[in-house]
Image (tube, rainbow, N blue to C red):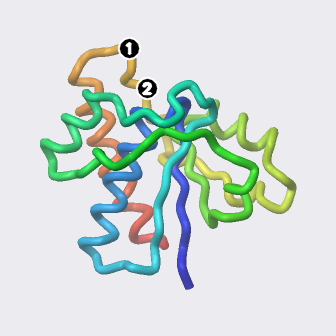
Amino acid sequence: MTMKILFVCTGNICRSPTAHAVMRHKVRAAGRADIVVDSAGTHGYHTGEGADRRAVAAAQARGYAMDDLRARPVTHADFADFDLILCMDAGHKLILERVAPKDAQHKIRMFDRRDVGDPYYGGESGFEDVLDQIEAACDVWLDAV
């Protein structure tokens, strides 16, 4: 059975596409064709745009490809289509819980025990810190599913 995982942040240009790229890489390396990943944002601020150049650079330096990812907002269909919807912070979780159907509430979870900080307004090092946290959390989720 295929496990479909959706990573969610605000605009789908920093945290969630990074998690998407990292998990996709780890899934392929583990030979787990049964896991499909995607990412989206709680808001459509950047629909159709690629990931933030700083996120792309940090990911590429560690061997993760993000060039093909394009920002999109979470849709109502996502609540039916995905088995796990992993939120980068508690604010995203609250937003999704407000709009998700009752039968999808159990799918909405925190990606990590602590919020993944938004590196958008900071410097390059913030993207490295986010990547460290995302790599560790992806390892945990890969083992769990």
101 lies above or below 10: below
Using the image, tell me which numbered label, if any, was put on residue 121.
1
Residue 109 relative to residue 9: left or right = right
Residue 95 in the image, given as x and y percentages of width and height: 72, 35
Above/below status of 38 relative to 50: below
Instruction: Name the amino acid type tagged 1.
Output: Tyr
Q: Picture quarter containing residue 99? A: top right
| Residue 92 placement (x, y as % from top left) | 63, 35
Badge 2: how crowded within 10 Å, few (<14), some, or many (20+)? some
Tell me the distance, in whole angstroms, between the alpha carbons under discs 2 and 1.
Answer: 8 Å
- The reply, left or right, for residue 72 in relation to residue 126 is right
> Which disc, if any, is residue 27?
none
Which secondary structure lies at badge 2? loop
Question: Which residue occupies the extreme right position in the image?
Answer: 102
Quadrant for the N terminus in the image: bottom right
Query: Which element type, helix, strand or loop, lies under badge 1?
Result: loop
- Give the mark count: 2
Q: Which quarter of the picture shows residue 97? A: top right
Residue position for label 2 = 118
* Rendered residue at 67%/52% (across/down): 108
> Which residue is depicted at the point 56% across and 51% down?
86
Using residue 119 as the reference point, say whether residue 4 is left or right of it. right
**Residue occupying image coordinates x 28% and y 76%:** 30
Q: Position of residue 59 (x, y in %)?
A: 23, 42
Q: Are marks 2 and 1 in contact (CB under 8 Å)?
A: yes
Residue 85, percent across and down? 60, 54
